[in-house]
Image (cartoon, rainbow, N blue to C red):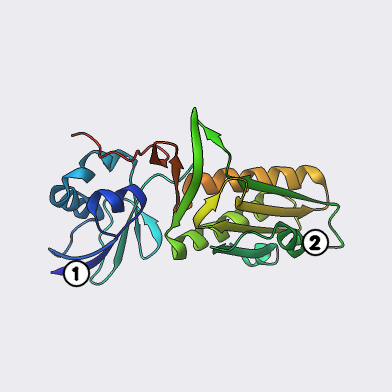
Amino acid sequence: MTRLRLRLFAALRERAGAAELEREFPDGVTVGEVWRSLAEEFPALGGARGTIAFAVNQEYVEADFKPRDNDEVAFIPPVSGGSGRTGQHVGPIAIGREPIDVAALQAAVADSGAGGVVTFVGMTRRENAGRIVIRLEYEAYEPMALQEMRKIAEEAARHFRITRIAIRHRIGVVEIGESSVAIAVSAPHRGDAFDACRFAIDRLKEIVPIWKKEHFDGGKVWIGSQTSHPPRG
């Protein structure tokens, strides 16, 4: 038998009523089969398969991957929205509950060879989709999220002529007007700095396992292709 540690996040965690589970499966089981077993155990998970990604020991894998005994298998719901050469271009990559110090992030990428610094700051706004937002709440699979954020920074350094890039994301409650994510990029020329910054935030929203719950006047909902209500069928 293969004993696995299972991790669930955001809407999946709420639907199953558990964040971490341990289960035994026949040797040779695939992560896809593990998911199907969970969906049978927790029917509220049943309609989510088409949007779920799998990770084993903090690395994305396909459904036919066969984990080993004592591996950690994570089920990743939709997220809200390197080489040695690139290592020198990667500045601080961090996740934390404290407010983001944007000036410190800019200072971390400053360099005498850079002609400019471009910074993106994502903030909690008062209205979204016709709703009055009260606050946002972020949750992360932190070890994997940090790993994926670093990969994004390294990829930006390969694709664009930048000097340095730094990324910080908050978790926990983020009130109206506060910053949830900030990316700073320095480069010899502004075009590369703008392009790298846009690439980094777009990629972060696509693949980094960080989830956003919107608390609004009258309810709350996970932002993404999931909702706060259990799927049908």
Q: Position of residue 32 (x, y in %)?
A: 23, 50
Describe the element under mark 2 as helix, strand or loop. loop
Mark on residue 3? 1
Near mark 1 (Cα within 10 A), the count class, few <14, some 14-19 or many ≥20, is some
Mark on residue 110? 2
Residue 233 sits in quarter: top left
In front here: 49 or 212?
212
Question: Horizontally, is 99 left or right of 220 in the view?
Answer: right
Quarter in which the N terminus is drawn: bottom left
Q: Are marks 2 and 1 in contact (CB under 8 Å)?
A: no
| Residue at figure coordinates x 60%, y 46% from the top left | 201
Q: Quick check: 126 above or below 79?
A: above
| Residue farthest along the top direction in this orientation | 130
Mark on residue 38? none
Q: Can residue 165 be seen at all in this image of the molecule?
A: yes
Q: Amino acid at mark 2?
A: Ala
Q: Quick check: 40 above or below 68?
A: above
Question: Horizontally, is 228 left or right of 93 in the view?
Answer: left
In front here: 18 or 59?
18
Residue 57 sits in quarter: bottom left
Residue 23 sits in quarter: bottom left
Q: Position of residue 131 (x, y in %)?
A: 48, 31
Q: Position of residue 170 (x, y in %)?
A: 55, 57
| Residue at figure coordinates x 26%, y 52% from the top left | 64
